[in-house]
Amino acid sequence: MSNRNETKMVVDKKNYIDPDWLLEIRQEAKALFKDIGFPNSRHETWKYLNLDQDLDLERHIKKTPIRRTERDECVSVLFKNNTPECESILANKNDLIITNFRSAYAEHKELIKSSLSKGLLQNPFSYLNTAQFDDGALILVKEGCKVEGPIIIDLQTHVEEERLKGIHTRTLIVLEKGASATVFVQHHSFLDKPEFVNDYFDIVLKEEATLEFILTQEGDQPYRFETIKASIDTKANLNYVSFVNDCLVTRHDMGVDFIGEKAVVNLAGIALLSSESQYFNHLYIDHKVGNCDCSQVFKTILRDKSLSEFSGLVVVAKHAHGTNSTQSNPNLLLSDNARALSRPQLRIDADDVECAHGATMGQLNPEEVFYLESRGLNKSAARALLTFGFAEDIIQRIKQPLIQHECDLILREGLSSYDKHR
């Protein structure tokens, strides 16, 4: 995008009052949160995450390094705790709009009102986000616009003089008919005390829109919850890749609604877990209409006493014929004390469909290690090569070259110490 046009919207935060329609949405979300209740082990989808346990989080806190993607062709949205600071770098004001909710309510009221979801049933914290987020960021790509460089969302958590009661960020991404864009989400923590971070992304893809959405998390950031709700219209295309490079307690919840035929959604992720990391990945894929394709491949590499859980439910409606939906959850265990839980599920009410699911759990194949040793590699190098090969294909699914290169470097760096801890 050649021309830069930086704009700043000024809103009186001190005297700001939410519009009535937003207050109504907040009240409904708050009521739903109270109705579901605070999650605990009695909830089926929270069975393995004990939020009441004493994790002694403070001893684990470490600040994450800031990694800078080459910014010449990038658009940036910076969140400092709850507050978005939007920087608009536009080729044409009418093609790409990036601003905060409060500045957009007047002009884009109906768009925001109709696109904001209240939450996901399996995650009460998603309703809490809707009830409590301070301000949000709107990314609107107009009809036919092709955004060349990536849009970077930088979620930063900072120390405040007064202890925060939680960080709730909200982002709405809307691509109109025929539009395309890449969104890259990064997390950076500058905390020296544990904090509750609750991020929510609404994604709306209109007809024939194409979005690549990459979400990365590095370092020990306690109690981080991510919610993604995506609405996919006719012939739209979503390519989603998540990359978790260690965490303390992280949970991802994603809901995908197919509302138009001939749409394609590819979901993939890789998680590198060590120490006592806990990572929970929950997906709900709803094929409301037929003739759509959805592929899920989520891999995890675990060592030490880390824990992972994958729970994916694919629902095919009664008349959603021609659906093609698959789930795959391979797990590589590099420690006898690591634990991986997997529950891929299908609920099919239509006849003419192609659906499959599966999960694997195991260690490196000794025969493959021996073969590489016979070709001249030592045992450590052989194991490192096989481990990298297990994860690399997920990174290769990222189409944006700058982001793929950056994630490849992080993957190599993250895996470099794995065999040393065996």
Image (cartoon, rainbow, N blue to C red):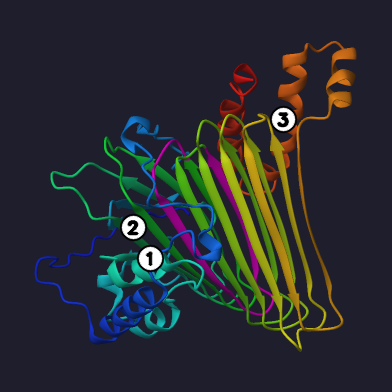
In the displayed structure, does residue 291 sit left or right of residue 307?
A: right
Which numbered circle lies on residue 387?
A: 3
Q: Quadrant of residue 282?
A: bottom right
Boundaries of the magenta span: 218-245
> Of label 2 and label 1, which has the lower sequence position?
2
Q: Position of residue 341 (x, y in %)?
A: 65, 49
For marks 3 and 1, give the CA distance.
38 Å
Q: Nearer the viewer, residue 160 or 48?
A: 48
Q: Tag 2: Cα neighbours inside 10 Å, few (<14), some, or many (≥20)?
A: few
Q: Check disc 2 and give the amino acid type.
A: Asn
Q: Tag 1: Cα neighbours inside 10 Å, few (<14), some, or many (≥20)?
A: few
**For the stretch drawn in magenta, what is the main secondary structure?**
strand
Residue at image point 72% right, 66% down: 345
Q: Position of residue 23 (x, y in %)?
A: 26, 81
Residue at image point 47% right, 66% down: 123
Looking at the image, is 308 positioned above or below residue 259? above
Which residue is identified by label 2?
5
Q: Is residue 313 magenta?
A: no
Residue at image point 60% right, 33% down: 411
Q: Check disc 3 and give the amino acid type.
A: Thr
Q: Tag 3: Cα neighbours inside 10 Å, few (<14), some, or many (≥20)?
A: some
